[in-house]
Amino acid sequence: MDDPVPYDALLLVAFGGPEGPDDVDPFLQRVTAGRAIPAERLAEVAGRYEQFGGVSPINGRLRALVAGVTAELGRRGIDLPVAWGNRNADPLLADTVAALRDDGVGRALAWVASPYSSYSTCRQYGEDLEAARRAVGEDAPHIDRIRPHHDHPGLVHPASDRLAKALDRLPADRRDGAHLLFSAHSIPAGLAATCDYATQVADAARLVADLVDPEGRHPREVVWQSRSGPPHVPWLEPDVGDRIEALAGEGATAVAVSPIGFPVENFEIAWDLDVEAARRAEAAGVAFVRAGAVDDDPRFAAMVVDLLEERLGGAIDRPALGALGVRPDACPADCCPAPA
């Protein structure tokens, strides 16, 4: 590639997770900092991690994604280092930004491990990056962010393939007419009214469902998981477990769940879907399968590099399979406001 690259590094940014029992409490303290979370609630969540040896899948998957993106950059002849930093677990963003500075990086482009537009999945990561830069000091590298990209083919096509494979794992006598459930992290209804998050999740779910089931033989819908906070505050519904039980009451015998809201495998998928939702499905007599997240598909790593190439100044199409249009490179000042 002949044109000069306007960035010195590509930075992958994720939520982070513990990688052993000693990491669980510090991780949860970072996640809940500034929030009045009862001690018994934190102990309950810590107990869930203990059932998995104190390990979340997300850090391991990010390491593999760094390797995949690095290899894809090499295949395209782009000489650019790939760094990785987390919001809540080592490697923390401030440490990564400091290392980039020490390596002489003046300008980096950040990809965030969620393609959707909401405060917690978009704007808050921008705030995290700015906080990391302030912690590093005046010589911290400038950091731009990659646009939201919920309908990029590098996400939609792998997700459809993973869901089709999940359907094939259902018992043959229950496969026809199985319900397709597309799960994403719930957010407060008040916040959802100020952003495009729910609309983008529904758009991604539709795109995947249409590829998997173009004839419309399977009922499909969006469900939500992982809600937290006071019970009197409305959050997006229905909850995935509640919906599975309701479907059982309506005569459904099988569900296939796509974690469309989570491109990278993580603990919330492992607990809320593989443990809780699967348990409730079994109790209700409903066959349950869960599609894998898509971060380890080579097309996903290629997508990250596609999104980088959009910003390198070349004349390149900006793929968008959905009906909502391509999001701008820089978020408008009034989008995805912080909770009151």
Image: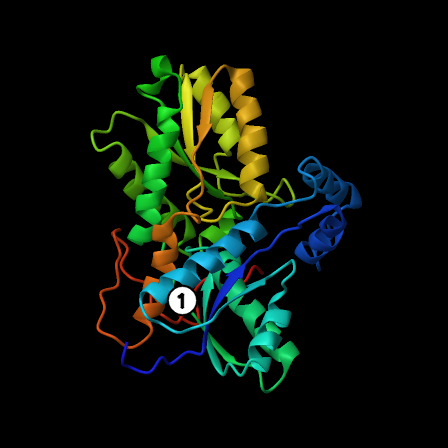
What's the residue at 41%, 25% (across, down)?
255
Eyeballing the image, is 7 above or below 176?
Answer: below
Image location (x, y in percent) of residue 143: 48, 76
Eyeballing the image, is 16 above or below 257?
Answer: below
Asked where in the image residue 46 lies, by quadrant, the reply is top right
Q: Tell me if residue 219 can be seen.
A: yes
Looking at the rendered image, the quarter that the C terminus falls into is bottom right
- Give the residue pinned by disc 1: 146
SS of the residue at dot 1? loop
Image location (x, y in percent) of residue 112: 47, 61
Asked where in the image residue 256 lies, by quadrant, the reply is top left
Q: Amino acid at mark 1?
A: Ile
How crowded is the residue under tag 1: few (<14 C-alpha within 10 Å), some, or many (20+)? many
What's the residue at 56%, 50% (across, down)?
60
Q: Residue furthest bottom?
A: 138
Q: Tell me if residue 151 can be seen.
A: no
Q: Which of 137 and 126 lies nearest the eye of the viewer?
A: 137
Say how many tags the image has. 1
Eyeballing the image, is 282 above or below 268?
Answer: above
User: Please, which colouring scheme is shown?
Assistant: rainbow
Image location (x, y in percent) of residue 175: 34, 19
Looking at the rendered image, the quarter that the N terminus falls into is bottom left
What's the residue at 63%, 64% (across, down)?
92
What's the residue at 69%, 58% (across, down)?
30
Q: Residue furthest right?
A: 39
Image location (x, y in percent) of residue 303: 34, 57
